[in-house]
Amino acid sequence: MKKLIFAANWKMHKSPSESRSFVKEVRSTCPESVHAQIILFPSSPCLEAVAESCKGSQIRYGSQNCHFEAQGAFTGEVSPRVVKELGAQVGLVGHSERRTLFGESNELIAQKVAALQKLEMTPMLCIGESLKQREENLTNDVLRDQLFECLRLADLRLPLIVAYEPVWAIGTGKVATPAQVADAHLECRKILAQIGSEDAAQKIPVLYGGSVKADNAKELGSLPNVDGFLIGGASLVVESFKAITAT
Ligand code: PGA
């Protein structure tokens, strides 16, 4: 059976103490064999609490955003170097909320992906179409543009994760159908092979995100090109997160 990745995007939820209790509960109730499949993305002020709580376990964690420079005069930004020192191995990049609410462009995202790879961290690059783009039959074009542009400076032989998250499914309760997910993931795999190589494309995990819950995770997780999930709302409560990891 394939080992899925279960990534939790907590967005701007949870305090340090709430983050600690979550990790503690996951560690004591989730089978240890599943820990290595878990990646937590707490908000930046909670990273240290998560780092301490994850010590001695195989649970990985990372930041939800970072700057492309390691340091400098960038008030309010998150340094990937600092996050790495806290033990983060992964960095979420290009989430649709960063793109739409904070104006992040593919060009900026490309620089962040490269910065993380330079620090030997794993970028988790989020891509996905809006409802309008899907209705206009532009999904594949959007995936192509986002992947080509955001991976312009990346080395596809280095660790990299892609998360396909249709914008219309994020936080809406509207999950993409298995056929839509299967098509989009196959398309991502083909595009990744064109950017890198067939071999590199096969090794890059492609996750699905957008209203993932225990009751849809089983079917979606069994699709051939789905290597795991990026989970928002359902990752906030240990019970629902655990139920997804048990699929
Ligand atoms: P959701 O969020 O699971 O609440 O739809 C997913 C995400 O934003 O990554």
Image (spheres, grey):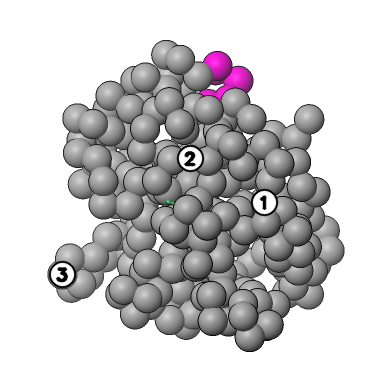
Instruction: Give the residue pinned by disc 3.
Output: 75
Whether residue 108 is visible here, answered yes or no, is yes
Would you say the beta carbon of the disc 1 residue lies within 8 angstroms of ligand 1? no
Name the kind of residue labelled 2 in the image.
Ile
Res 172 quadrant in image: bottom left
The location of residue 50, given as percent across then percent down, is 31, 34
Instruction: Give the residue pinned by disc 1.
Output: 205
Q: Is residue 105 left or right of residue 71?
A: right
Residue positioned most to the right: 198
Callout 3 secondary element = loop
Pick whichever of labels 3 and 2 is earlier in the sequence: 2
Pick whichever of labels 3 and 1 is earlier in the sequence: 3
Res 209 quadrant in image: bottom right
Q: Is residue 131 left or right of residue 186?
A: left
Name the kind of residue labelled 3 in the image.
Thr
Which residues lie in the magenta part? Answer: 31-35
Q: Within 10 Å of the Cα at label 3, are there few (<14), some (14-19), or many (20+) other Cα atoms?
A: few
Q: How far apart are marks 3 and 2 (CA)?
A: 27 Å
Q: Is residue 247 left or right of residue 90?
A: right
Instruction: Give the residue pinned by disc 2.
Output: 39
Q: Distance between the residues labelled 1 and 2?
A: 13 Å
Whether residue 90 is visible here, answered yes or no, is no
Image quadrant occupied by the N terminus: top right
Res 192 quadrant in image: bottom right
The location of residue 86, given as percent across then percent down, is 32, 41
Q: Within 10 Å of the Cα at label 2, are there few (<14), some (14-19), or many (20+) other Cα atoms?
A: many
Mark 3 or 1: the one toward you: 1
Q: Which residue is drawn at 50% across and 19% down?
A: 30
Name the kind of residue labelled 1 in the image.
Pro
